[in-house]
């Protein structure tokens, strides 16, 4: 009897996974919600309904409780409701959607799987929630069923496999790339219909050339699924992440970890080439070290300064970066382990030594000729047999380069240990097209160049006595590497009022050039020069405060900032209230006494001399807001004294100076105070609209003072430390 194999595979939908959802009213007080969740453990999230019983968003329990656990939140939350914590960027699905379809859409919406629940609807009716953990568990079981069925139905699935193979080939670059003096070519030879190798190259921002290569463990359709997922994630991430190999690998690790379910691992090598600066930054997730040819030295070497675990092993793996300079005639050769591990008839591997020797013997050819010659050599070595593993290669040649004059320079002070090797802060400056002038001694100011002294953490820690200031027109910037609270007293005593935190993601969103040099001397961070959609408002009465706050909230909402940063509607009113009240109270005591109303929060008309102005703008990276007063009386001592008191654990008390400034700094993502003495003080804050930044994270801040850029400081001036 001929047995009939059931070719059907029942993929479950969300109906079997959906659990009932608790809902809450948008008007529910934050403290009441906090107590409710503590008494009802196990609730992953709460859909929030408005007065018409329409869902307006979701509160994720873990995220909410973490926020409310911070000391200052309980004091502030008395005025907050559930609306202030709503996440409008939630993921929803229909109850009859198949689990595999839901996961695919979820990874596009939330590649890091930061939110642990899915909101389930039946048509327009809220039905319940599904936890992501249960979804992944069911999909894992479904994948195993699929693999078992594939073994029985290989012939029936051949057509589907052919389609998958064609789809995978379509995902790879189909032609060579020439861009601003760089010539790239790649090829992929799969050992099965669907391969487990990935390569790609593309351009972003008309400046950066990206090379990527990956190798998934195993072969066939399961590996091909991970390849497709990784390729999809690679092309959908924001440009600022694509420009930073370490961040790219971390995000890609989330995608592979979720898709591979720890059954499939992926090695990955990623290069970002800045074609203007002729610098290549790269990261390695367990991949074979590529080869780099330095034309000036006429030798090949391996790019082995950076390496981490393959993608899909450890969800929390942290990746680092390496860097090389490029020049005309340099070449790069990337490959997968299929090249190294291919064997001859005697069972001997092709090996690294043969690759290095063959590269050294290849004349200066095009990238296509280089990789095809290597493939022909491997084919001869394998005696024409089908390769045991996928073989993938990328070749790059630097054919020309036009030198570019840089407009800004930074003097970088380093401790003795830090001078032995290039350090991450140097890489950061080079990535932002800023010259780094090495040395621990003061350098003379170049002609017609603004020079800013930057103190690395190591150099600052080893200093004693005083900081020489001769030749500098700007206060030194501390590139901080340890928490502010652990060094704030010394920072205050040394009058270091420009502190940029190492690893602060907001720096790249605003731009390091902007934060070091500003736009001009009088308005260091003029938002009109930073945004194309700035709005400027003149405030003539303190009663306008609420209207201005609502106007900025509506402005941010129009650009979707409240969806990307769900806590923004709760943070902005507190931030703006503090900024405006500071401006209202900034006048000298003699002037404020003459108005007859000097208490904070008093409703009064502003005198013509006060001229309080608000400016705000937004782009796809940040929301910026500035508030200015016409007095120019704010000093760095005020800022640093407040920070010292509260960073060292002081209680936030009403009426105690500096408390509002500290909360302002905590609640925004970056704080900048610029003073033009006797003319104006400008408070500027930035918020990222791309990701949530923890209020308790180490934030960057700066106090800058307008001065004549041509004025020289005398050579015997010192700042005590």
Image (cartoon, grey):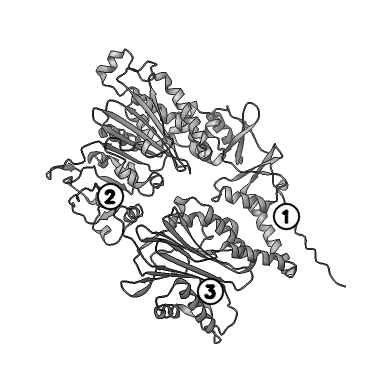
Q: Residue 558's x, y, as percent?
A: 52, 34
Tell me the quarter of the image containing the C terminus: top left
N-terminal label among 3 and 1: 1
Q: Residue 307's x, y, as percent?
A: 43, 64
N-terminal label among 2 and 1: 1
Above or below 682: residue 313: below
Above or below 445: residue 708: above
Residue 544 visible (yes or no): yes
For mark 2, does the 10 Å Cα neighbourhood hold few (<14), some (14 to 19), or many (20 or more) residues? Answer: some
Mark 2 in CB contact with mark 1 (< 8 angstroms): no
In which image quadrant can residue 641 be found?
Answer: top left
N-terminal label among 3 and 2: 3
For mark 1, does the 10 Å Cα neighbourhood hold few (<14), some (14 to 19), or many (20 or more) residues? Answer: some
At numbered mark 1, what does the secondary structure look like: helix, strand or loop? Answer: loop
At numbered mark 2, what does the secondary structure look like: helix, strand or loop? Answer: loop
Q: CA distance from mark 2 to mark 1?
A: 59 Å
The residue where tag 1 is placed is 11
Mark 2 or 1: in front is 2
Q: Is residue 533 left or right of residue 133?
A: left
The residue where tag 3 is placed is 338
Q: Is residue 291 left or right of residue 226?
A: left
Q: Residue 142's x, y, as percent?
A: 69, 58
Q: State the residue in front, 219 or 539.
A: 539
Above or below 36: residue 438: below
Disc ID at residue 408: 2
Numbered label tally: 3
Q: Is residue 471 left or right of residue 423?
A: left
Q: Residue 137's x, y, as percent?
A: 65, 54
At numbered mark 3, what does the secondary structure look like: helix, strand or loop? Answer: helix
Q: CA distance from mark 3 to mark 2?
A: 46 Å
Residue 263 visible (yes or no): no
Q: State the residue in front, 17 or 570.
A: 570
């Amino acid at each position: 009897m001929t047995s009939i194999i059931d070719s059907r595979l029942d993929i479950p939908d969300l109906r079997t996974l959906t659990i009932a959802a608790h809902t809450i009213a948008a008007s529910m007080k934050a403290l009441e919600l906090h107590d409710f969740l503590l008494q009802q453990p196990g609730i992953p999230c709460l859909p929030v309904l408005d007065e018409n019983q329409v869902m307006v968003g979701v509160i994720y329990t873990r995220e909410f409780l973490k926020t409310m656990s911070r000391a200052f939140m309980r004091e502030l939350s008395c005025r907050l409701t559930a609306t202030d914590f709503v996440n409008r960027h939630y993921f929803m699905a229909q109850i009859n959607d198949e689990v595999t379809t839901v996961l695919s859409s979820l990874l596009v919406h939330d590649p890091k799987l930061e939110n642990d629940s899915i909101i389930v609807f039946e048509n327009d009716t809220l039905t319940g929630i599904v936890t992501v953990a249960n979804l992944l568990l069911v999909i894992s079981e479904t994948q195993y069923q699929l693999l078992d069925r594939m073994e029985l139905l290989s012939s029936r699935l051949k057509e589907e496999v052919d389609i998958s193979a064609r789809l995978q080939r379509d995902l790879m670059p189909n032609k060579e790339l020439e861009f601003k003096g760089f010539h790239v070519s790649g090829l992929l030879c799969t050992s099965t219909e669907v391969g487990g190798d990935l390569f790609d190259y593309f351009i972003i921002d008309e400046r950066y050339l990206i090379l990527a290569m990956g190798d998934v463990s195993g072969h066939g359709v399961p590996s091909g699924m991970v390849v497709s997922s990784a390729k999809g994630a690679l092309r959908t991430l924001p440009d600022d992440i694509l420009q930073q190999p370490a961040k790219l690998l971390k995000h890609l690790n989330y995608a592979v970890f979720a898709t591979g379910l720890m059954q499939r691992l992926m090695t990955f090598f990623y290069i970002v080439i800045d074609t203007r600066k002729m610098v290549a930054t790269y990261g390695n997730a367990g991949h074979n070290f590529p080869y780099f040819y330095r034309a000036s030295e006429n030798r090949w070497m391996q790019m082995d300064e950076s390496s981490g675990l393959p993608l899909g092993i450890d969800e929390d793996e942290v990746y680092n970066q390496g860097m090389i300079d490029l020049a005309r005639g340099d070449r790069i050769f990337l490959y997968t382990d299929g090249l190294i591990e291919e064997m001859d008839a005697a069972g001997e591997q092709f090996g690294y030594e043969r690759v290095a020797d063959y590269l050294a013997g290849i004349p200066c050819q095009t990238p296509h000729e280089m990789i095809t010659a290597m493939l022909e050599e491997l084919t001869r070595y394998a005696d024409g047999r089908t390769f045991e593993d996928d073989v993938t290669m990328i070749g790059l040649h630097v054919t020309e380069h036009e030198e570019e004059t840089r407009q800004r320079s930074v003097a970088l002070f380093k401790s003795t240990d830090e001078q032995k090797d290039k350090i991450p802060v140097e890489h950061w400056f080079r990535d932002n097209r800023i010259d780094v002038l090495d040395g621990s001694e003061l350098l003379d100011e170049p002609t017609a160049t603004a020079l800013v002294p930057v103190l690395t953490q190591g150099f600052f820690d080893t200093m004693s006595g005083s900081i020489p200031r001769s030749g500098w027109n700007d206060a030194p910037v501390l590139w901080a590497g340890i928490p502010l609270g652990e060094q704030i007293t010394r920072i205050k005593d040394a009058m270091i009022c420009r502190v940029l935190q190492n690893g602060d993601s907001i720096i790249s969103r605003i731009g390091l050039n902007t934060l070091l040099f500003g736009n001009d001397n009088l308005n260091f961070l003029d938002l009109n020069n930073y945004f194309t959609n700035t709005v400027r408002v003149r405030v003539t009465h303190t009663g306008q405060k609420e209207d201005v706050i609502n106007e900025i909230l509506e402005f941010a909402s129009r650009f979707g900032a409240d969806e990307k940063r769900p806590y923004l509607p709760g943070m902005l009113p507190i931030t703006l209230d503090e900024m405006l009240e500071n401006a209202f109270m900034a006048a000298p005591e003699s002037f404020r006494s003459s108005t007859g109303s000097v208490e904070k929060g008093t409703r009064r008309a502003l005198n013509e001399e006060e001229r309080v102005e608000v400016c705000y703008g937004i782009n796809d990276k940040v929301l910026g807001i500035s508030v200015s007063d016409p007095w120019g009386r704010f000093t760095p001592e005020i800022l640093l004294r407040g920070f010292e008191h509260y960073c060292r654990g002081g209680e936030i008390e009403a009426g105690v100076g500096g408390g509002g400034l500290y909360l302002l700094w905590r609640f925004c993502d970056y704080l900048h105070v610029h003073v033009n003495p006797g003319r104006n003080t400008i408070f500027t804050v930035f918020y990222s609209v791309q990701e949530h930044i923890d209020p308790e994270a180490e934030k960057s801040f700066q106090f800058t003072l307008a001065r004549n850029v041509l004025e020289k400081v005398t050579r015997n001036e010192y700042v005590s430390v």
